[in-house]
C-alpha cells in the first residue's frame, strides 16, 4: 500500500494515512510540506528547491498537507498532523504545475495527484521522477541555483555533481539511439515481424522512448492492460496503430497489441499493425496501413495527419501509465523506393533512398504542440523526395510561426 510502489494516480487516502501510522521519516526520496503558499517566498522557494533537488538526484515524492512534526521546537522530519487543504483540487493542481513551469529551468516533469482525505479536502502528492534532462535549476532574477537531494535535506550542487548530471543527460539520448538501432536491425532481418505473411507493402515504424526508460527502477504497471477488467478497455484502445479489431496479449517484453484488417479480396489489401509496449516505457509501432502500395504514391499532408493522430493517442496512453517526458520520438519508413510523393494532389517527387530513418525529435512536455515537435521529421521526409520543406505547414504572416494545417482546420 506504500506510495513508493504504485503510480501516482493510484495513491489513496489509506496510503497517506500509512505514512503517518508508520512514522515514515523524510528521506532522500520523501519530503513533507504543510502547504505551498505562493505569497510566501519561503514556502515557494523551499518547494521549488526540493522539486529540482529530487529531479537532479534519484527522484522522490513531496506530500503537501502533512506537517513536519516538531519536538522541543525542532523539526524532526517525521509526519505530524495530516491537514488536508480545503481547495478546488483541479485549480490547486494547475497552480502548482504553473509554479514549477514558471520557476524551474529547464522545466521539471512532475505528476501531481490530489488525494481526497475527506469531503472537499485534499492532500497533494507530487511525484518527481529522476530526470534524464538534468541538471535543473530554480530561476530567480539574480541567479540560477542547482540543488541536489540527500538524506532528509538538500544542498547546492558542486561542479562534480553538475558534470555528472550533464553526462547523464547525454547518456539518455545515446541509449535511446542504441535501442532504436537494435530494434530496426531486428526488423530488417525479419526477426520481429509479428505476421510476415500479411506484412506486405511499405512499413512505417515508430519508436517512442522515454529519456528515463533505462533507469533500473523504471517499470510500468502492466496490470493496467489486463483486458479482462472493463475499466482498462479505454487505455488499451489507445494503444493501437491502426483501425481494426485489436488482439491484445502479454509477452516476454511486456504487452503487444496486434491489428489485422483486410480491405477487400486482394492479398495486397491486408493491413497489419502492432504496438509493442516494453516494461520500461519504450513503445514500438509498426504498420503497413499508412502508405498504400497500389498505386505507388502517397500524399505528405495525409501521411502527416494520420501519424500525428496516432502519436497523440499513443502519448496519451503513456501519460496515463505515468510515463514522463522527455520522450524521444523516431520514425522510419521502409519499402518506398521509387514511390511518388507530393502535397495537395501534386506529385512531383520520388524517393531514391530506402529505408528512411529520420533523426529523432524530443517532446519535452506533454503540453507541447506535437505538430511543432514533428516538423523536423516532416521536413526531412519532404527533402528526401526533392521538396525544400513540408508543404503541410503554413507560415503565419503576423508571427512568422509555421503551423501545421491540422492546427488551422
Image (cartoon, rainbow, N blue to C red):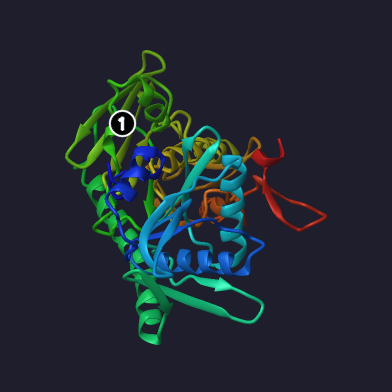
Q: Quick one: which residue is furthest to the front in this view? A: 72
- SS class, disc 1: helix
- Image point (45%, 31%), residue name: 292
Q: Quick one: which residue is furthest to the right in this view? A: 398
User: The N terminus lies in which quarter of the figure?
Assistant: top left
Residue 129 is at least partly visible in this image: no
In-front residue for pair 100/374: 100
User: The C terminus lies in which quarter of the figure?
Assistant: top right
**Quadrant position of residue 299:** top right
- Image point (62%, 62%), residue name: 102
Q: Position of residue 123 (x, y in %)?
A: 48, 45
Q: Quick one: which residue is furthest to the top in this view? A: 265
Q: Quick one: which residue is furthest to the left in this view? A: 252
Give the vertical position of 75 relative to 277 (above or below).
below
**Quadrant position of residue 96:** bottom right
In-front residue for pair 325/386: 325
| Crowd tier of the residue under label 1, counting other residues whose Cα lies within 10 Å: few below 14, some 14–19, many 20 or above | many
- Look at mark 1 in the image and give the residue it sits on: 225
Give the vertical position of 233 relative to 62 (above or below).
above
Q: Count the marks: how many?
A: 1
Q: Position of residue 218 (x, y in %)?
A: 29, 53
- Image point (59%, 47%), residue name: 92
Give the vertical position of 328 relative to 300 (above or below).
below
Q: Position of residue 185 (x, y in %)?
A: 25, 52
In-front residue for pair 169/158: 158
Residue 401 is at least partly visible in this image: yes
Residue 76 lies left or right of residue 88; in this view the side is left
Residue 141 lies left or right of residue 200; in this view the side is right
- Image point (43%, 24%), residue name: 243
Q: Position of residue 125 (x, y in %)?
A: 44, 49
Amino acid at each position: 500500500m506504500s506510495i513508493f510502489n504504485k503510480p501516482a494516480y493510484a495513491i489513496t487516502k489509506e496510503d497517506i494515512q500509512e505514512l503517518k501510522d508508520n512514522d515514515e521519516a523524510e528521506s532522500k526520496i520523501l519530503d513533507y510540506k504543510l502547504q505551498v503558499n505562493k505569497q510566501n517566498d519561503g514556502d515557494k522557494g523551499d518547494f521549488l528547491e526540493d522539486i529540482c533537488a529530487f529531479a537532479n538526484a534519484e527522484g522522490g515524492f513531496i506530500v503537501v498537507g502533512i506537517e513536519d512534526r516538531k519536538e522541543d521546537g525542532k523539526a524532526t522530519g517525521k509526519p505530524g498532523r495530516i491537514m488536508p487543504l480545503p481547495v478546488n483540487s483541479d485549480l490547486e493542481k494547475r497552480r502548482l504545475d504553473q509554479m514549477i513551469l514558471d520557476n524551474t529551468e529547464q522545466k521539471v516533469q512532475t505528476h501531481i495527484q490530489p488525494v481526497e482525505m475527506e469531503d472537499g479536502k485534499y492532500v497533494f502528492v507530487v511525484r518527481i521522477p529522476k530526470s534524464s534532462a538534468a541538471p535543473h535549476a530554480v530561476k530567480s532574477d539574480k541567479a540560477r541555483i542547482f540543488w541536489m537531494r540527500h538524506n532528509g535535506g538538500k544542498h547546492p550542487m558542486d561542479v562534480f555533481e553538475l558534470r555528472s548530471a550533464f553526462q547523464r543527460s547525454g547518456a539518455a539520448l545515446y541509449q535511446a539511439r542504441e535501442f532504436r538501432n537494435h530494434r530496426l536491425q531486428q526488423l530488417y532481418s525479419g526477426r520481429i515481424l509479428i505476421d510476415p505473411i500479411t506484412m506486405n507493402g511499405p512499413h512505417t515504424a515508430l519508436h517512442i522512448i522515454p529519456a528515463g526508460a533505462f533507469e533500473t527502477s523504471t517499470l510500468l504497471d502492466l496490470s493496467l492492460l489486463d483486458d479482462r477488467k472493463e475499466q482498462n478497455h479505454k487505455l488499451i484502445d489507445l494503444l493501437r496503430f491502426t483501425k481494426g479489431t485489436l488482439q491484445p496479449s502479454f509477452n516476454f517484453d511486456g504487452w503487444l497489441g496486434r491489428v489485422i484488417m483486410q480491405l477487400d479480396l486482394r492479398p495486397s489489401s491486408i493491413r497489419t499493425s502492432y504496438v509493442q509496449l516494453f516494461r520500461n516505457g519504450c513503445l514500438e509501432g509498426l504498420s503497413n496501413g499508412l502508405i498504400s502500395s497500389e498505386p505507388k504514391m502517397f500524399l505528405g499532408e495525409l501521411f502527416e495527419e494520420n501519424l500525428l493522430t496516432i502519436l497523440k493517442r499513443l502519448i496519451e496512453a503513456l501519460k496515463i501509465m505515468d510515463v514522463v517526458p522527455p520522450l524521444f520520438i523516431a520514425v522510419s519508413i521502409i519499402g518506398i523506393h521509387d514511390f511518388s510523393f507530393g502535397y495537395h494532389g501534386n506529385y512531383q517527387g520520388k524517393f531514391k533512398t530506402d529505408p528512411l530513418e529520420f533523426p529523432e525529435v524530443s517532446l519535452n512536455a506533454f503540453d507541447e504542440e506535437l505538430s511543432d515537435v514533428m516538423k523536423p521529421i516532416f521536413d526531412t521526409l519532404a527533402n528526401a523526395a526533392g521538396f525544400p520543406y513540408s508543404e503541410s505547414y503554413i507560415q503565419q504572416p503576423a508571427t512568422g510561426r509555421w503551423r501545421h494545417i491540422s492546427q488551422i482546420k
